[in-house]
Amino acid sequence: MNKNRIEGFHVAVKPLAAVVAVAVAQWALPAYAQEAPEAQPDPNRLQQVVVTANKRVEKLESVPMAISVLSEEELQRNNVREIEDVIALTPSLTQASGTTAANNALFMRGIGTVSVGIGVESDVSVILDDIPIAVQFQAFRDLADVARVEVLKGPQSTLFGKSAVAGAINIVTKPISGPMTYRGSAYYTNDHEYRLAASMGGRLTETFGMRIAANKSDMPGNFTNLTNGQKVNGSSGKTMMAKFSWTPIRNLDIDFMPQYNEQENTRGVTAVNGFYRTTGSAAAGNLQRIPVDINTAYMNGNPLLPASVVLAGIDPTNPRNRLVRRDFPTGIASRTHGAGLKFSYTLPNDATLMSISSYQRYKANDSRDQDFTDVPTIARPGETRLTVGNNQFGTYDINSKTQEFRLVSPDNSSLRYVAGLWWARNEIERHFIRGFCVAPTRCASNSPSSPTNYYTDIYNVNKAVFGQATWDFAPTWTLVAGLRRNLEESGFNYERNFYTDQLDRSTFVPGPVGVDVFSSSGNEDWATTGKLSIQKQLTPDVMVYAMTATGHKGKAYDVTSGLRASAAFPVDPETSRTYEIGTKANLFDNRLSVAAVIYKTDFKNYQQNTSFVLPNDPTIYTQLNSIPEIGTKGFELDANMLLTTGWSVNASMAYTRPSIKDWKNGPCYQDNTNPAIGTTGLGEGGSLGGWNRACFPIRAGSTTGIQDLSGGIFPGTPKIKVNIGSNYDLRFTSMPFRAFINGNVRYQSDYQTNINNDPRSVNDGYTIADLGFGLRENKDRWRLSFRINNLFDKFYIPNANASGPSFRAGPTSTSPGINVDSWVPPRDVFRFYSVKLDVKF
């Protein structure tokens, strides 16, 4: 074990030791409230699942909307640590991976927002204990002390606001209940990932309870950087969470919930795993791949950058290549701290009046090696020798404050309601530097390495009034109606130059106003969203429902490095409308629960950052588009079965068909099998030479092309995604422990990964199986688990169009281009083994 790992272990142990010390101290306290042991669940029936999807506690089978729930048992059995693990187990969710974790995006039913700027909000809201996360990429961190995860599908803007236009993920941490209980766990894998966790919680007196949890994790990574021998494409985190619950007077509960998280994520490093040229034409059916000799290839056609040096020690033709060369970090390191404060007062009529306040501060440093190698690729002014690398780096500073007042009616009436007032303010600051350009060179956006240096900040203030009522208007009929009126005020400031040696505000000199300096403030957006459903209880155990809801996401701003005056205005708000018809049933004396739904959702003015590249330029450019209309439709099924005592099976499936309904000026993709005819610059059928055959000049004589993507595939989601899990407990009559075995199989079909519908950007389908087994004490005081992830060592590539270096088959900028494939492997692309010990006392 090296020195860094030992120091990391000591850092991890300190907070855990503190928790243990407090726990030991608690043993000396008098037992003011010795509560009766919790009632044991009936082993011959499924356990009841409750959710807070409607901002009140309800039974899952009674809520007329599509919800998938991951229980604490499922989370523990599958070793869920991050939101990526939740995505793997939930067919309605997918993820779009960006160049770093700061550009990751969650997709619900095939729809999500991929943005590299801070001026575009997400389509899927993430809520932690009633408090929404300000920016979605903050959710890509350790999930600590979680009791359940509720995946709320379809627009949730009525109760959860403007960033839930496609859905919401509601994360609920473990409650304070019962006498003081102490837990600890340790996890280790054969590829050196480890996790340590400790928690304590319970009632200390009749009026005071507490819960404290600490987690430390480290996954070194599944790539090796040959430059320094270190592992990359991993993550590590430290999390401290607490809850303090106090009842100072009768009917008043006060909860204080501080939290702290440190996260370091090196995902986003891409490795070359394909190196070839193509001949022929896909249209003619004679497209062929031709291997390329690495000794005759040059990065960007530069004679000073032969592939044999740039990729030294790397086989770029190996589809499983896990070796890279980097002399600059790629990833993001962040710190989050904040707290929530909740007051709950029970009124004389048993209604509950609540005040929920929160504050959160997020600071991060992100970076990326833009030239994908460890040798210099840029020459300083006046020099021909390459001495500088092409890198990018920046900072985020996010402040979020929220305040909600909520009134929740009692449950014992035919009319139940929740109503509230909402206020939130988000302030996001971003500093970003890319490339290299210094005086006396005249720097501009089209200079080599596409340099930029900008400061920008975004703010938005949201005020809303909302309400939702549930009315049992007949013995077996229920109507649910909700409405939200929202006012958002937003704006931004932006300052830019192109000199990358001006590293802070004291040396930064922006360009001229209207060219490199923009601002806009006080932009108001009024919106009304609603929800309406009708529910029929066919039998005491079976219900059907029909539901419609609308969603609204506020104005967006294109504050990225390529901002121009024409784009310095808000992009129109994004709206959605969904229709659902579903059923939920508990059958066979509550041994089988089933939920099924068909849906159709349309989005207008969909906000999307599109990435594209230009010929002979490795830089990735982005532009914010407002796509007129996209949509998604499909079918979802969730089932839980208790086959026999101790043997349970859960299954979920999603059939998802997202599509582009209207986008006549979509981006093209490059295709060197469509060469220009003569000197016209045009290829087959009048298309633009060097681009796909549906790509035509935006106007006569233009070298910029567009294609009509109406009716095309909206990328990022497989048509079919299935997850099946099972757990079997084997009890021994005379033993104080029992054995268990569990397994999980997930399948997803192939899917398009690029919005330009490039047929080469399709990920193949795959099936992954996991197997677990172990022993647990009958009173669950300890559990020893073993697990094999990717049991059959199934190899798959999840991102067929990951960005990577550009090469040419010769030492000039006009030499024939080489197709270069790059990838970022997921955690389980290679089989790995783990062991976990959980204790409770």
Image (cartoon, rainbow, N blue to C red):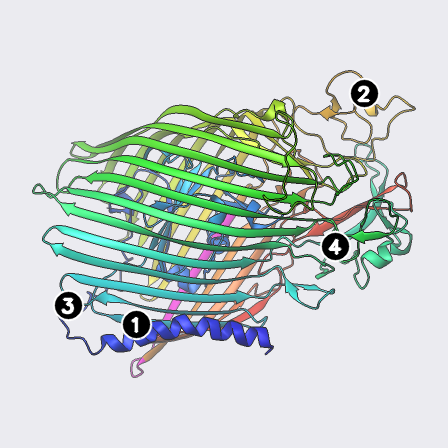
- Disc 3 is placed on an element classified as loop
Q: Earlier in the sequence, mark 3 or mark 4?
A: 3
* Mark sitting earlier along the chain (2/4): 4
What residue would you read off at disc 2?
686
583 left or right of 822 in image:
left
Residue 656 in the figure: left or right of residue 210 = right
**Secondary structure category for the residue under label 4:** strand
State if disc 1 and disc 4 touch (CB < 8 Å). no
- Whole-Å distance between the Cαs marked 2 and 4? 34 Å
Residue at point 60%, 25% (across, down):
567
- In three-dimensional space, the C-alpha distance between marks 2 and 3, rounded to whole angstroms, equals 80 Å
Check the image and name the residue furthest to the top. 700
Say which amino acid is labelled 4: Asn
| Front position among marks 2 and 1 | 1
Assign a secondary structure to mark 1: strand
Q: Along the polypeptide, which appears first: circle 4 or circle 1?
A: 1
Compute the Cα span from label 2 to label 1: 72 Å
Write the start and end of the magenta stretch as one range. Answer: 721-736
Residue at (46, 46) in percent of width and height: 653
657 and 158: which is toward the camera: 158
Write down the residue under mark 1.
Answer: 182
**Residue 222 - label:** none
Can you name the residue that lies furthest to the bottom here? 734
The residue wearing badge 3 is: 35
Crowdedness near tag 1: few (<14), some (14–19) or many (≥20) residues, C-alpha within 10 Å? many
Q: Is residue 323 visible?
A: yes
Mark 2 near mark 1, Cβ–Cβ under 8 Å? Answer: no
What's the amino acid at mark 2?
Gly
Question: In terms of sequence position, does the residue under pointer 2 or pointer 1 come before the other?
Answer: 1
Nearest the eye: 273 or 600: 273
